[in-house]
Amino acid sequence: MKPWLNVVGIGEDGLGGLSPAARQALDGAELVAGGTRHLDLAAISGARRLAWPRPLEAAFPQILARRGTPVCVLASGDPLYFGVGSTLLKSFSVEEIRFFPGLSSFSLAAARLGWALQDCACLSLHGRSLERLIPPLQPGAHILALSWDQTTPGDVAKLLNQRDFGDTRMSICSCMNGPREDLRSTFAKDFSLSEIDPLNLIALEIPAGTHGRSVPLTAGLHDDWFEHDGQLTRSDMRAITLAALRPHQGELLWDVGAGSGAIGIEWMLRGPSLRALAIEPRQDRAARIRRNALNLGVPDLKIIEGAAPQSLASLPAPDAVFIGGGAGTPGVIEAAWASLKPGGRLVINAVTLQTQSLLERHHSTMGGEMLQINLAHAEPLGRFHGWRPAMPIVQWRIIKDRAGP
């Protein structure tokens, strides 16, 4: 199909900032949809003006009714960079759409500050949890974050101070590339800016030598990072388990019998595209998992309150499954294996002799790898030190055959 839906990125400079091709697509449209601000910037009025309702998808039937005739959608900056473009592609094929990207807020902010954009962490806090900002808080980092509204910079300053990043330089870039452009800078510990425009982006420059509470980039966070009641896969064992689970881009993990949620949380920390479901029957532990997830910057961890295997039946198929608690419950291993996608990984840790025997039986009939992991830590022994061994752990890991059922 010949493209008929033109998506034009427009900035605060209005029509003057559009390329000739984008201006032609706009001028030739029989219907122009967009936010009220965008429509005003383009001076669109009358019957061809369609302001987005809430939700904006409610306007799609009107657009679909004009399929094949020229329609234009106005968007902020680059429509495919935290913009409306990805939403449109869920309802319209790429063959129908032609994109005319403008300058994104990220590009404009980097240009104002003299930052190399490829070295910046770019994220959006618009309609998203503030805790998403936590993982990229690293010494020496440059972060560009789209705000929800005028209150976001103050909330970010509070978060930075809570995590001992008060020496971070904050630049608030508002209404960039337009007549109302404003750029003000301060340190998080001194934040007192007021009269901030709702249309703003926050640029964070974290000193290289800062001693803030940054989340390490490796698996196996220290146990003190997690609130727990003893139901916790310990740091060293957690690193071994994450290596066995082998997270890949965009994959989903089931953390069955999640306890403190440590495995699911660390899985998601390996990359922003990774997803996890923490399945936990106890309400108090489920609440604890939520607190741990927020504190470590993975607010999108999904918590399923319920006992396995019953609670597994309606869940989306996983790419990997970890069973840390409840492996001995009848039907749990079988239900997890049946739901696992071909090529998926199943990893189970067992401490008790009974569960270890169960894993041995499954290993005998299904294959995979069995490991016995023995860890010991040096502890004071009088005036000296000695090795204090932990209980041995048996780990069964198996990959589901792509050619199998």
Image: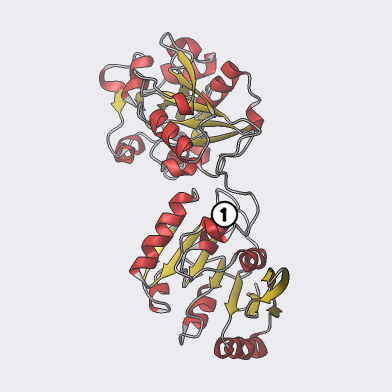
- In the image, what residue occupies the spot 50% across and 85% down? 328
Q: Tell me: 362 left or right of 192.
A: right
Res 299 visible = no
Res 352 visible = yes
Name of the residue lying farthest toward the front: 383
Give the quarter of the figure containing the C terminus: bottom right
Which of the pair 70/256 is nearer the observer?
256
Check disc 1 and report the residue beneath it: 250
Which kind of residue does numbered mark 1 sit on? Gly
- In the image, what residue occupies the spot 46% across and 85% down? 329
Q: Tell me: 355 left or right of 130.
A: right
Which of the pair 328/205 is nearer the observer?
205
Q: Is residue 339 above or below residue 100?
A: below
Q: Residues within 10 Å of mark 1 (few under 14, many from 20)?
A: few
Regarding mark 1 in the picture, which secondary structure is present there?
A: loop
Which of the pair 219/378 is nearer the observer?
378
Tell me residue 395's x, y (percent). 64, 78
Residue 375: quarter of image? bottom right
